[in-house]
Image (cartoon, grey):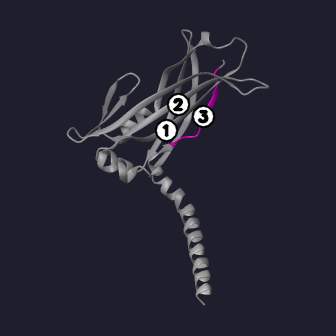
Amino acid sequence: MNRLTNSSMTRRGTQRLLIALFASLLIAPSVWAQSGNVEIRSANSELRDGVHRASARIQFQLSERIDNALANGIELAIRFDFEIYRQRRFWPDANVATLQVVNVLRFNKVSERYTLVNENTGRRTSYATIFAALNAMGRIDGLPLVDAALLRDGASHSVRLRADVSMADYPVSLRYLLFWRDDWHVNSDWYSWSLDP
């Protein structure tokens, strides 16, 4: 009788585990959506003074939860990854150059303003609202990508861009509570375009 009881208990335990796993898969997308969304609306480049320069419009829709986290000392890292590659017919595309632009967004409780720091240049700008900061950051104009001399004549070249938002820094007291939370990380899909005129 104990064997039957143990067997039925094992079956019930397995069923509960499977139901919990299935439920977590259904809930996971909604948890992800709580962080917001990042979308590259448009991107292109032009050749000026021998340098290909990129322009892009990126839309950031971050959740109120992330805004609250910023207000409590968590910094956000907003990264733009550019990849320039040469297209090849019978081989995988060849990587020509990569560029990573990193911005850190933080909230100053004393001034009650949002500060955006470009880690590549050290430039700091201040905004009254998170909306204004994200709107400014979503506008890339004339960013130097690659020197035209580095590109092979007669070959086709393309660029792809991805935007990524994650926690940059946070209080030590929160590290052990948040290290497992994937919903603090949001990134866009890759956006590609031709580099050639």
Relative image position of residue 164 (x, y in whole percent):
49, 38
C-alpha span from label 3 to label 1: 13 Å
Relative image position of residue 30 (x, y in whole percent):
51, 58
Helix, strand or loop at label 3? It is strand
Label 1, residues with CA under 10 Å away: few <14, some 14-19, many ≥20: some
The residue tagged 3 is 191
Residue 116 is left or right of residue 1, and the answer is left
Q: Is residue 11 magenta?
A: no
Give the residue type that dot 1 points to.
Asp
The residue tagged 2 is 81
Residue 58 is left or right of residue 3, and the answer is left
Give the residue type that dot 2 points to.
Asp
Give the residue type that dot 3 points to.
Tyr
Specify the label residue 164 is tagged with.
Answer: 1
Magenta residue span:
187-195
Asked if disc 2 and disc 1 are in contact, CB closer than 8 Å, the reply is yes
Which tag, 2 or 1, sits closer to the chain's start? 2
